[in-house]
Image (cartoon, rainbow, N blue to C red):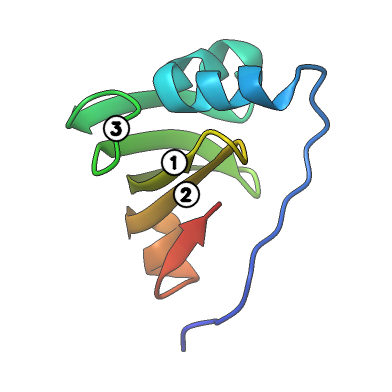
Amino acid sequence: MALSGKLICFLEISKKGDVFLDIFRYNPDEFSAICPHKVHACELIEGDRGAVGSLVHWHYTHEGKKKIDKAIIEAVDEEKQKIVFDVIGGDLVEDKYKTMKCD
């Protein structure tokens, strides 16, 4: 049975939103240096880094277990400092959620 709902996470960061968006969009592999206990790697599989439609693999730890997910950058709004990922495959989608969008 699949769960339905929203997964919301609040993280305190000590940088302005534009700096965080820039790292998330163009250099997501830096997250493995920023929080190595949570994010282990981020690989660009298809497309251009930071471009809408690009496919990214995330390697991370969730609930104490190492996981991998595939996400497509669905939208970027620099004015609102927002990036939307559509998680299309991997552990969270297979184990807990039928579909998942992160924005």
Q: Identify the residue under disc 3.
A: 51
Q: Are marks 2 and 1 in contact (CB under 8 Å)?
A: yes
Give the amino acid at mark 2.
Val
Give the amino acid at mark 1.
Val
Can you name the residue that lies furthest to the left here? 46
**Relative vertical location of residue 25 with respect to residue 10 in this rendering, above or below:** above
Which of the numbered marks, if any, corresponds to residue 84? 2
State the CA–CA distance, disc 3 to disc 1: 8 Å
Per the image, label 3 sits on a secondary structure element best described as loop
* Residue at 53%, 33% in the rendered image: 78
- Answer left or right for 74 relative to 66: left
- Answer left or right for 29 relative to 90: right
Q: Identify the residue under disc 1.
A: 76
Q: Quadrant of residue 88?
A: bottom left
Where is residue 94 shown, x and y percent of the image? 37, 66
Q: Tag 1 or tag 3, which sits nearer the N-term?
A: 3
State the CA–CA distance, disc 2 to disc 3: 11 Å
Give the amino acid at mark 3.
Ala
**Relative vertical location of residue 47 with respect to residue 88 in this rendering, above or below:** above
- Answer left or right for 16 relative to 98: right
The mark total stands at 3
* Residue at 57%, 10% in the rendered image: 33
Q: Nearer the viewer, residue 103 or 81?
A: 81
